[in-house]
Amino acid sequence: MTDVSASDFRHPRRYVRLDTILRLRWLAALGQLAAIFVVVQGLEYDMAIIPCVTIIGLSAALNLVLQTLFNPVHRLEAISAAGLLALNIIELAALLYFTGGLQNPFSFLFLAPVLISATALPTNYTIGLGVLAATCTTVLAFFHLPLPWDSTDPLVLPQIYLLGVWFSIMTAIGVTSLYAFQVTEEARKLSDALAATELVLTREQHLTQIDGLAAAAAHELGTPLATIFLISRELVKNVDKNPELAGDLRTMAEQAQRCREILSKITQLNSSGAPFDRMRISQLIEESVSPHRDFGVSIKVRIAVSNAPEPVGMRNPAILYGVGNILENAVDFAREQVEVNAWWNADAIVLSISDDGPGIPPDLLKRIGEPYLSRRRNTEDGPRRGLGLGVFIARTLLERTGAKVTFSNRVFPDHGAVVQIAWPRDAFETAGQLAELD
């Protein structure tokens, strides 16, 4: 039940829409033209207008070419998106060269392309763009034209201040990009894991629907088969002169009886709206435990006797998958034995699954249940590290049913992990007090 393919979710291909980058480039070009207009016309400062306008014009021309050649919804490969972001850095560096270098307050815009890359592109491209931005910043600290300023009152900034500007840009590129990358990566992991959860739940619901159709068919076919069986037996009694016909009738009766037995087994499956939809908590435990009994690990089930009647709930694929997944993990990590304990009262239902394995490492104990949390486990092919996606799916599905799932370790000198699943009784039963199953 933990065999969920995570590779497609764990390493998705990352694309950036061309339209998104072009919008940012157009916004940058308009902002740069506006800044030049304010400096020249508003503040009446002298600056290298022609080189700056030429750079902005070339950037705008490239935007037009890209819009002409490609559909705006075209998604760029990571290397193409990184190339355009690198071009943004170079264009900004060229403009800053003609307008004062690091003395220009717009020098902090070096952060923008690197930050965009940190949230949308793979790590190696982000590192490359960060190195390019840092290189351009360092070069501009030594080589640049004077900052456009009032010639009658020239601005002279001390070197220690320029060093501080350089250091702050370097820090912003590193720290802010790293923070943005971590936040985006966590959000991406959670989104991918939830997508896998939805896929698993959909599969389980489809299986339940198939079971329902089978049970409904068995219920409907039971009556005509019984009629065929009874009529064939009566015909056998009255056919004495034709032994061959009597033999055929006996065969038909035997096959009809066999069909009835097969259908009686099928009726134990789930069927929507039929009595088979409901199951006791003891039946839930047995159905979850039975697939894991033949793996060399003893599974002991203890159900505490209570004055309250045994809980009866809907046959929920989410609960069956979640409990089965946790049981499978317990069997995988156990050395000799897994214990399943259940108890309830009028208000709550508690299911505890524990093993005698190494337990959950302290550094993972508070994070267990997160998606893609690596943990070493034993398999038929030897030890390997799991992604933790199965536990995340199990926990998510169980919590959707109203359960609270907690992870802990046994108290020394015992060893092993303990998973406790607790439901409010009304949440488990979903419809108050239910009639006892036949």
Image: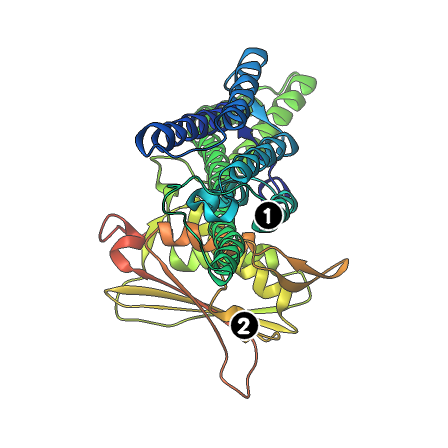
View extreme (front): residue: 152
Q: CA distance from mark 2 to mark 1?
A: 32 Å
**In x, y percent, where is residue 176?**
47, 53
Can residue 5 be seen by looking at this rendering? no
Read off the residue under disc 1: 130
Q: In which quarter of the view is residue 69 placed?
A: top right
Viewer-closest of 194 and 424: 194
**In x, y percent, where is residue 259?**
56, 31
Asked if the residue under mark 1 is in contact with the one under mark 2, i.e. CB atoms within 8 Å, the reply is no
**In this rendering, position of residue 416 left or right of residue 46:** right
Please give the label number shown on residue 363.
Answer: 2
**In x, y percent, where is residue 180?**
47, 50
Viewer-closest of 283 and 27: 27
Mark 2 or 1, which is nearer the eye? 1
Viewer-closest of 155 and 199: 155
Q: Residue at x 77, y 57 (%)?
A: 381
Disc 2 on helix, strand or loop? helix
Can residue 168 be seen by looking at this rendering? yes
**In this rendering, position of residue 46 left or right of residue 75:** left
Q: Amino acid at mark 1?
A: Gly
Please give the label number shown on residue 19.
Answer: none
Q: Amino acid at mark 2?
A: Asp
**In this rendering, position of residue 313 left or right of residue 104:** left
Viewer-closest of 182 and 357: 182
Disc 1 on helix, strand or loop? helix
Q: Residue at x 49, y 32 (%)?
A: 210
- Up/down of 277 relative to 325, above or below: above
Image mark count: 2
Query: What colour scheme governs how the chains and residues are painted in the rendered image of this protein?
Result: rainbow
